[in-house]
Amino acid sequence: MTENELIALLRSAATDPAARGLDDDVAVLALGETHLVLTHDMIVEGVHYLPTDPPADVAWKLLAANLSDLAAKGAEPVGALLGYMLGEDGWDRAFAEGLTTALAAFGLSLLGGDTVAASAGMPRTLGLTAIGRSRRTPPSRAGARVGDLLWVTGSIGDAGAGLAVLRGELEGESALIERYRNPRPRLEAGQRLAGFVTAMMDVSDGLLIDASRMAKTSGCAVAIELQSVPLSQAYLHARGDAREARLDACTAGDDYELLFAASADSARRILALAEEIGLPCSRIGAFGDGSGVTITDRSEPVALPQKLGFEHRA
C-alpha cells in the first residue's frame, strides 16, 4: 500500500475542519484569534537517515523536519512532543543531548511524549510532534490559482547529493552532507510570506512530487522551468549543470525549502523580502488550467522522470 492509498482510507475519519481533509502537512485548530498548528513526522533508520549518522544529527533532523512544516504555514513554534524507541545506551544519551541542543537553538521546550523498548536489531523509528501558533489563518497547499507563479526558497538537491556523498556514490563538498544531516527550517521566511502567498508547503519528498501535490489539491496544472530551479555552487561542482543533474535535484528529497504560489504582482515584494532576510527566492514555474505537472528546459519540453520524488510504500 502507498502513503496516498492509506490516507484515502483514513480520510472519512478526518471529520474535523482542523484536519484540512488530510490534504495538508499540518492540522490547524482555531482557538479564538489564535490558530494552533500541529504536525507530526517520523524518521526511520535506513530510510530517512543512515545508521552511521551521528545521533545528535538525527535528533536535529527529526526536529527540523517538523519545524519545516510549521514554517510552511507561517507558524511560530512553541513546543514539541517526542516518540522515542529505546536502544543502545550510548546512542540514546547522544541523541538526548543532541535534541536538547536542537530545541535550545530554536528556543523550544520539550513538552512530553512517549518511549518504547524494541527488540534488538530493529531499525530505530522516531517520531516528533511540533506545535506552533499563528495569528492568521495558515496557508494550505490548496490555494494556488490559475495564473499564480510558483516559487522556491534557497537551493534544491543539496541533501540528495549529500546522501550520495555519504554512500560513496559521489565526490562532493562537506556542505552537501551538512544540508542532508542538518537542514534549516525556513521559519522566518515562512512567517513573512504567509500573509500574501496563496499556497505554501515545504519540499521534503522532492520538488517535482511536492509541486504536483500542490497543483492537485489546488485543482490546477503546474509548469516548471527546469533552468530556473536554483542549484548551489556545491551541487554544481559535484554534479554539474546538465539536464540529468537538474532533474536529479528536482526528485531528491530532504531539501526542506519552502515551495509557494503567489500572484504575479507579488514578484517585486517577494524579491525585496528575499534580499531583506538574505534567503534567495526563485520563480520556477506557473499554474495553469488542467491538471498534472509539465517540465520545460529553456522552452523545450522535457519528459517527466519515472519517479517525481519519494513516496512511502509497503
Image (cartoon, rainbow, N blue to C red):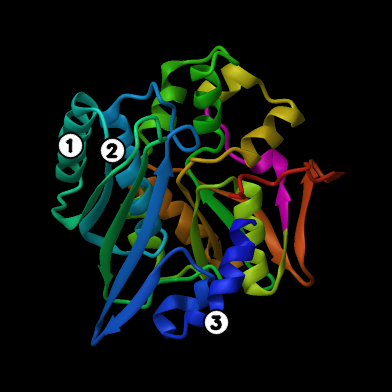
Q: How far apart are the alpha carbons under marks 1 and 3?
A: 37 Å
- Mark 2 = which residue? 59
- Residue 154 is tagged as none
- Residue 96 is tagged as 1
Query: Who comes first in sequence, dot 2 or dot 3?
Result: 3
Give the residue drawn at x 32%, y 41%: 118
Q: Quadrant of residue 53?
A: top left
Residue 87, position in %: x, y? 27, 33
- Mark 3 = which residue? 12
Image height of 244 relative to 139, above or below: above
Image height of 118 relative to 291, above or below: above
Given contact means CB atoms under 8 Å apart, are the residues at marks 1 and 2 in contact?
yes
Give amino acid for label 2: Ala
Magenta-highlighted residues:
223-232
Residue 159, position in %: x, y? 49, 32
Instruction: State which quarter of the image contains the N terminus.
Output: bottom right
